């Protein structure tokens, strides 16, 4: 009798792979295209060049996702992960764009240096894994869910830039999507139940089309096929400050990614060790190098898709492989990408509430495995770390006196929580490598059915 296949390695029938992969793409699409739109606007690029940025971004997202999920030798963690542009890099890249003489070539040079730095730093992760026991991982993942909920709320209100943010129509559509998802989860079974998020998004999209909210103007001018070529905006240029800044960004990304890898391992029931995390970080670094070569941006494993894994209960990495192939197609087919990009933010907001809430719930479930009786100070680790993480959410100007170079740290609740949790745990608990691995196993047993 052949050995049973782990849910992470299960290959689903092709129709299910395509549908579930599309669901993942829809969840990450808005954030993925937001970065080229924001940066292109800051650099005052013409619309055709911004369109090139978007297509190159999606194409590079697809390549990075395939590397991370399929794996190539010592690269790729082989878990259900979607790769996308890291939001941590937005503020530094905007600052670079404002520097005289930097422009896009200077940004791409910094991204390339950051990717190479990450590739060199990845092998040393085994020395820091002991600093991520369950109390640290659970706290970080809880805060990831809280921070992402802010994104979901912005979507539900019509998008942060909407002049009529919070209008009744937006909230009604978001509520409709949420209600459809909950009804499908409650009353459907099997594959239909796993497709709850996609069904909810489709219902909201159809409603906005019927109401005339969806703008398809401009789709006629998009070509049927656009080949994505490397170095479309010229050769990278290297400037000291942007390069050093991007190395700092990659360090921050690695801290965040390590917590996400451990949480996803707990969720899927696959124990994640130092070598696994190392392979995942290598894929993040190589994805960033690919981003620089295709004139796009730094890439990281997307945390919002972890919430989708929680909701659907589908742990197959081949679903995300399908998502990567879909992103490649979207990068090559501008008209198809245009249709997907036209999904209004309020539709995604309804799905965001449940997906991002599930991320926080996963963190709470992992924290339930911590022995707070024998490690009384672990309560302080959780309390203070979450408190620090909430600062940029409740008071964005709290750290305004710090220089712009430090904004990626002090303006990100996830990073503040990560640094605080690691340092406080090291101060109070001094977790050993063996204890950290045991905590990870307990977290896996607790979270695999969430």
Image (spheres, helix red, strand yellow):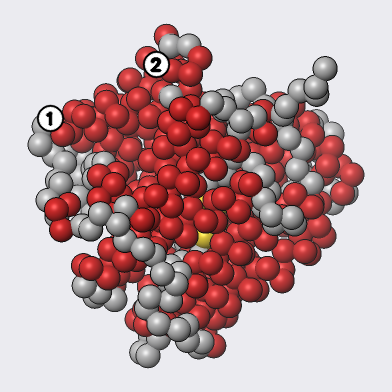
The x, y position of residue 220, in whole percent, is 14, 53
The x, y position of residue 346, in whole percent, is 26, 38
Please state which of residues 173 and 200 is positioned toward the viewer in this rendering: 200
Report the residue at 38% width, 22% height from top: 181
Q: Is residue 299 left or right of residue 35?
A: right
Q: Is residue 313 left or right of residue 107?
A: right
Quadrant where the N terminus sits is: top right
Report the residue at 58% width, 73% height from top: 114
The x, y position of residue 120, in whole percent, is 71, 71
Please state which of residues 17 and 245 is positioned toward the viewer in this rendering: 17
Q: Is residue 440 left or right of residue 154?
A: right
Report the residue at 35% width, 60% height from top: 55
Name the quadrant containing residue 112.
bottom right
Name the quadrant containing residue 313.
top right
Quadrant where the C terminus sits is: top right
Report the residue at 43% width, 57% height from top: 59
Name the quadrant containing residue 404.
bottom left
Alpha carbon separation for disc pair 1 and 2: 22 Å
The x, y position of residue 111, in whole percent, is 52, 73
The residue under label 2 is 184
Q: Residues within 10 Å of mark 1 (few under 14, many from 20)?
A: few
Which disc number belongs to residue 210? Answer: 1
Residue 113 vs 197, above or below: the answer is below
**Residue 187 in sight:** yes
Residue 178 vs 302, above or below: the answer is above
């Amino acid at each position: 009798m052949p050995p049973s296949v782990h849910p992470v390695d299960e290959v689903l029938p092709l129709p299910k792979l395509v549908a579930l992969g599309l669901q993942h793409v829809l969840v990450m699409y808005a954030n993925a295209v937001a970065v080229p739109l924001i940066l292109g606007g800051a650099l005052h690029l013409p619309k055709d060049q911004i369109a090139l940025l978007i297509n190159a971004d999606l194409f590079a997202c697809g390549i990075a996702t395939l590397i991370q999920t399929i794996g190539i030798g010592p690269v790729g963690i082989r878990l259900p992960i979607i790769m996308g542009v890291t939001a941590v890099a937005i503020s530094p890249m905007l600052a670079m764009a404002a520097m005289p003489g930097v422009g896009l070539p200077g940004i791409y040079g910094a991204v390339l240096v950051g990717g190479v730095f990450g590739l060199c730093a990845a092998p040393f992760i085994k020395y820091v894994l002991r600093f991520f026991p369950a109390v640290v991982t659970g706290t970080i993942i809880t805060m990831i869910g809280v921070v992402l909920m802010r994104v979901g709320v912005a979507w539900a209100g019509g998008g942060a830039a909407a002049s009529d943010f919070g209008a009744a129509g937006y909230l009604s559509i978001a509520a409709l999507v949420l209600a459809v998802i909950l009804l499908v989860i409650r009353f459907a079974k099997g594959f239909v139940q796993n497709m709850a998020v996609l069904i909810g998004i489709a219902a909201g999209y159809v409603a906005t089309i019927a109401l005339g909210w969806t703008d398809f103007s401009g789709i006629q001018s998009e070509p049927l096929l656009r080949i994505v070529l490397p170095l479309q905006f010229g050769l990278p240029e290297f400037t000291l400050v942007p390069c050093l800044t991007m190395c700092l960004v990659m360090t921050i990304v690695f801290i965040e990614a390590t917590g996400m890898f451990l949480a996803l391992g707990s969720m899927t029931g696959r124990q994640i060790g130092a070598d696994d995390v190392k392979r995942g970080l290598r894929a993040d670094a190589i994805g960033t190098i690919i981003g620089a070569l295709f004139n796009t941006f730094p890439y990281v494993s997307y945390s919002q898709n972890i919430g989708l894994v929680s909701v659907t209960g589908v742990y197959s990495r081949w679903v995300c492989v399908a998502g990567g192939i879909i992103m490649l197609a979207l990068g090559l087919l501008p008209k198809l990408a245009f249709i997907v990009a036209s999904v209004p933010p309020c539709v995604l907001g309804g799905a965001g509430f449940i997906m991002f809430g599930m991320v926080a719930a996963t963190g709470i479930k992992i924290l339930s495995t911590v022995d707070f009786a024998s490690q009384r100070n672990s309560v302080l680790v959780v309390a203070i770390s979450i408190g620090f993480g909430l600062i940029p959410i409740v008071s964005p100007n709290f750290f305004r006196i710090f220089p712009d170079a430090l904004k990626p740290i002090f303006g990100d609740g996830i990073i503040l929580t990560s640094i605080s949790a690691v340092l406080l745990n090291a101060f109070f608990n001094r977790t050993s490598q063996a204890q950290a691995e045991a905590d990870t196993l307990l977290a896996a047993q607790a979270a695999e059915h969430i």
